[in-house]
Image (cartoon, rainbow, N blue to C red):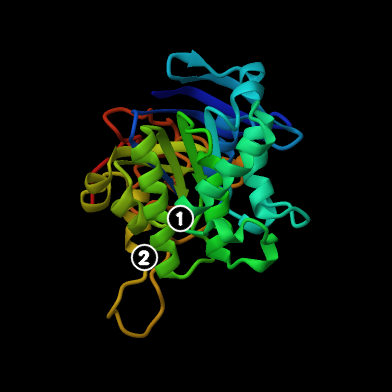
Amino acid sequence: MLEVEGLVVTAGGVRLVDGVSFEVGAGELFGLVGESGSGKTTAVLALAGLLPAGVERAAGTVVLADEELTAERLERVRGSRIGFVFQDSSGSLDPLMRVGAQVAEVWRIHGGGRREARRRAAELLERVGVGAHRARAYPHELSGGQRQRVGIAMAVALDPRLLIADEPTTALDVTVQAQVMELLSRARKESGAAAVLVSHDLDLLARYADRIGVMYSGRLVEVGAAREVVERPRHPYTRALLASRPRVGAGRGQLPVIEGIAPQPAERPAGCAFHPRCAVAVERCAVDSPALEGGVACWVAGDE
């Protein structure tokens, strides 16, 4: 369904996303995980043609349902064939428009009549659990979870072929987080859309994703089935991420962390970008950049 090959995103000549490739099948959920600044959000914004000014997709191809998504094509299909759920539900909704009108606007923009748009908006608000009776509410009158549901309603309104969600559960409590994820999963399965979910939470991706891609410094360093990546990680960075998760019952004390900091894109070191922080790096890691082969980009994959 979705094929991404050699995606490169630059800003001022600096590579923010550096040669990322992956595929997502129909009805499949692909999770992207990594530290802040790893390039996850930049990559998915590029897929939807939503990069900010000064940032551009410099290379690579994106194909959705056998059709290449050029910049011109994205202008026509975004919102209809591509749905996007933003991280900040408050920032993505117009504070001066009632939420029902914002959902209805999706249909009007893509050729639907005003009356039909209002009817469909009410149906969709009911479907996502906000309730048709809240159609006349303004965003500030809804809870964070309800606003995120409205954002999902807008994203899935026209049954897109590609559904992208950029950390949709940020700042939500665990109960609402689960409800939002179940809603996204149901929408994906009902429409058969390919879905890409960006998250910092490996446990969440292990629960909901079919496959996981781990990003570090603009590159994919590991890709595999969700259970395989979480239970048998091969890249040292993936292992470090898993080790740094807080654990229930671990008692008091300092949380484990990954030593050092991720490099800025303009200061990416030669070789494997993770090697300055890696406990098992060898001399070659500082010289040669490993390609993603067999699901992992590492010269010492699997070494403890």
Foreground of the two, 65 or 80: 80
Q: Which residue is mark 2?
A: 245
Residue at the image point whose x is 65% and y is 20% from the top: 71
Residue at the image point whose x is 21% and y is 52% from the top: 231
- Asked whether, in this view, residue 286 is left or right of residue 92, the answer is left
Q: Give the quarter of the figure containing the N terminus.
A: top left
Residue at the image point whose x is 67% and y is 61% from the top: 137
- Helix, strand or loop under label 1: loop
Residue at the image point whose x is 44% and y is 66% from the top: 176
- Helix, strand or loop under label 2: loop
Q: Is residue 177 above or below residue 93?
A: below
Q: Is residue 184 above or below residue 244?
A: above
- Asked whether, in this view, residue 112 is left or right of residue 160, the answer is right
Q: Position of residue 154 (x, y in %)?
A: 57, 43
Q: Are marks 2 and 1 in contact (CB under 8 Å)?
A: no
Q: Identify residue type, mark 2.
A: Arg
Q: Identify residue type, mark 1.
A: His
Foreground of the two, 246 or 254: 246
Which of pointers 2 and 1 lies earlier in the amino acid sequence?
Answer: 1
Q: Which residue is mark 1?
A: 200
Q: Closer to us: mark 2 or mark 1? A: 1
Foreground of the two, 8 or 210: 210
Total tally of numbered discs in the picture: 2
Q: Position of residue 54 (x, y in %)?
A: 76, 33
Foreground of the two, 120 or 171: 120
Q: Residues within 10 Å of mark 1 (few under 14, many from 20)?
A: some
- Asked whether, in this view, residue 35 is left or right of residue 178, the answer is right
**Whether residue 222 is visible:** no
